[in-house]
Amino acid sequence: MSACLIAIIYIAFISLGLPDSLLGSAWPVMHGDIGVPVSYMGIITMIISGGTIVSSLFSDRLTRRFGAGLVTAVSVFLTAAALFGFSVSNSFVSLCLWAVPYGLGAGAVDAALNNYVALHYSSRHMNWLHCFWGVGAAVSPYIMSYCLTGGYGWNNGYLSVSIVQIVLTALLFISLPLWKRSGTEGGATAVPANTLSLPQVFRIKGVPYILVTFFSYCALEQTAGLWASSYLVQYRGIGADVAAQFASLFFLGITFGRFLCGFFADKLGDKWLIRIGIYTTLAGAALILLPLGTDLPALAGLIIIGFGCAPIYPAIIHSTPFNFGKENSQAVIGIQMACAYVGSTFMPPIFGLIASHVQIGLYPLYLMLFSLLMLLMSERLNRTAGRRAAGADTNHL
């Protein structure tokens, strides 16, 4: 049963990635068809991000009440319904309305699945699961591209992914009995405890450190990916086609890096995976910053940042039960997800303002700032967790 369940969870992580890159792939055609400016995509993404933040914050209450399995199934159904709604929409207002369940479903399933895997599976599986998220995020633009180039339209692109999500929803509902593990019922947590309020979670020692770490990571990852091509073209003078290729290699570095990390994750441990990942991102940013006569170090630095990012997100999630206790992990992970979406939503546009009003050449320094902030906060958390573990050992003796 465990093998069947982990296979289903792997498929569920692919479904998490499928909707994430659809809007960006379809919007160049969508905005013309519905008659709105290209900038209106930002409104839709903000609504989706708002929904993910809200559902992430409530994920602890939902998961304790209904169990991770049911929350995952219902959340994937919400995203499937939202994608179907996008496929039949012919106005901007309609898209905005469907963006609400789109975001609510994404946030709840992300928090519930990540916590379940952190509690019940090794760091190896956590890295490979997030690698499968990258597979989903990479596949959906190809589905949309096929529909657009084949004359089927963006509506059918959304419809195709919606059908995939509906099939997965059915599979998840059928698999609910498999979520009984370690004394759980339907995926509910094995550690009975009261639902924590936000102030209670923030009072747990070390929580502010991990929230800033997660915020910084997502700010770094999204800024690096979204602004890579613009930096290479406008500041480095690299051709747009070459810049686009290397920008895509950044995301490939994350996906392939997580696949490789799966082989070493259990031996190295979460703390060292995070530490090595942060130092690697710093090295990559330093290569981009070097004022050399050739652009090769900058291009290589972008890929290196991708490899550095690879283990950080999965390791932060997987270490949460150890750092804050199994009874608190769902509440902490929910808030971590909310901070992640805040970082990925607001920090890239802030760099856009910096690029417009100061200089886009500050791109590597902006990335280094978040890498250093991650390093500082994660090391403070390690010291806090170390003192907690030492105190627990003393009490046990």
Image (cartoon, rainbow, N blue to C red):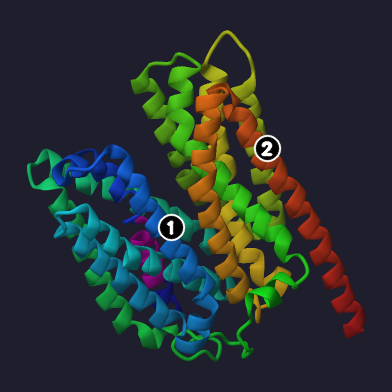
User: Which residue occupies the foreground of this view, 265 or 329?
Assistant: 329
Distance from disc 1 to disc 2, alpha carbons, whole Å, reads: 24 Å
Q: Which mark is residue 274?
A: none
Queried whether the magenta region covers residue 171, the answer comes back as no
The quadrant of the rendering that contains the N terminus is bottom left
Q: Secondary structure at mark 1?
A: helix
Label 1 crowd bin: few (<14), some (14–19), many (20+), radius 10 Å: many
Label located before the other in sequence (1 or 2): 1
191 sits to left or right of 96 = right
Q: Which residue is mark 1?
A: 49
Magenta region, main secondary structure: helix
Q: Residue lying furthest top in this view? A: 293
Residue in the picture at 29% in, 83% down: 174
Label 2 crowd bin: few (<14), some (14–19), many (20+), radius 10 Å: some
Stretch of the chain drawn in magenta: 7-17
Q: Which mark is residue 369?
A: 2
Residue in the picture at 73% in, 54% down: 378
Q: Secondary structure at mark 2?
A: helix
Q: Is residue 133 above or below residue 186?
A: above
> Which tag is nearer the camera, tag 1 or tag 2?
1
Queried whether the magenta region covers residue 14, the answer comes back as yes
Residue 134 picture location, percent across and down: 41, 51
Q: Is residue 220 above or below residue 200?
A: above
Residue 190 picture location, percent across and down: 58, 87
Residue 221 picture location, percent across and down: 53, 43
Say which quarter of the image contains residue 101: bottom left
- Please say whether residue 151 is visible from this viewpoint: yes
Say which quarter of the image contains residue 249: top left
Amino acid type, mark 1: Ser
156 sits to left or right of 170 = left
- Please say whether residue 310 is visible from this viewpoint: no
Amino acid type, mark 2: Leu
